[in-house]
Amino acid sequence: MFVDHAGLALFPAVGAFRCVGRVSFPIYCFLLTQGFLHTRDVRAYGRRLLLLAILSEIPFDLLIFGRVACGVEQNVLFSLLLGLMALLAADTLRGKPVQSALVSLTLCMAAMVARVSYGWLAIALCLCVYYAGESRTRLALSMAGALLLYTLSLALSGVTSSWVLVSLCALFSLPVLLTYNGRRGARNPVFTFLFYAAYPLHLLALVAIRAMRIVPPYFLR
């Protein structure tokens, strides 16, 4: 994620940065779903995510659009929050596939109307992980299908072919996810705080780096 944003803000002509960044989003969706499945208080989980999304919006707009507020796109934490809502709906409406599907489609529409990063993809990926259960085959196939469908939608929307190819790099996240052993790692309150704070802090750091031009000036033309 940091590599992705560093490339966007400081090295826009170097596509490799964006390729690396595409790998991070499916991993975040996977981790979010694991957090949902194992948290003791999903509402507190959602409140933390909402608070972090709100706090991150100004740094996101400053870095991406160069202004304090911009409605063109909302930061990725809002996307993950919608994914969490879809997971909660799927779990609450278990055994009611029609109602669950309608809620998921409504959230997908909300994601596109609100212009959150990646649109409906967070909702789709989180649900892929949720419904895959313990099956690595279902996980790989469903997530690959969602990523390919998203890439196809980009191509049909008229984005450049180079960006379509960059988006395909998200598929490289699958080998990483398939190594998951199902066990939770060591817990540390300090690391937990740093993981939450990393998103807004790295955005602010990149804003400061760009403002002070702490990179060779020919990268900023």
Image (cartoon, helix red, strand yellow):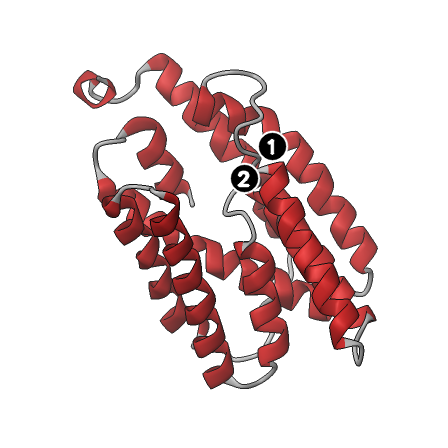
Q: Are marks 2 and 1 in contact (CB under 8 Å)?
A: yes
Give residue 124's position: percent from left, percent from top: 57, 62
**Residue type, mark 2 in image:** Tyr
Q: Is residue 84 visible?
A: no
Note whether 39 is above or below 110 in the view shown.
Answer: below
Q: Quadrant of residue 97?
A: bottom right
Q: So how many labels did they put on this image? A: 2
Is 171 displayed left or right of 81 in the figure? left
Q: Residues within 10 Å of mark 2 (few under 14, many from 20)?
A: many
The disc placed on residue 56 is 1
Q: Which residue is mark 2?
A: 199
Mark 1 element type: helix
Rendered residue at 21%/23% (across/down): 219
Q: How far from the left and from the top, in percent, is residue 126?
A: 59, 64
The location of residue 212, given as percent across then percent down, is: 36, 13
- The C terminus: image quadrant: top left
Q: Horizontal placement of 108 versus 39: left or right?
A: left
| Marks 2/1: CA–CA distance | 7 Å
Residue 125 can be seen, yes or no? yes
What type is the residue that disc 1 sits on?
Answer: Ser
Element assignment for label 2? helix
* Residue 39 as seen in the image, left or right of residue 12: right
| Picture quarter with the N terminus | top left
Q: Residues within 10 Å of mark 1 (few under 14, many from 20)?
A: many
* Residue 96 higher or lower than 204, as above or below: below
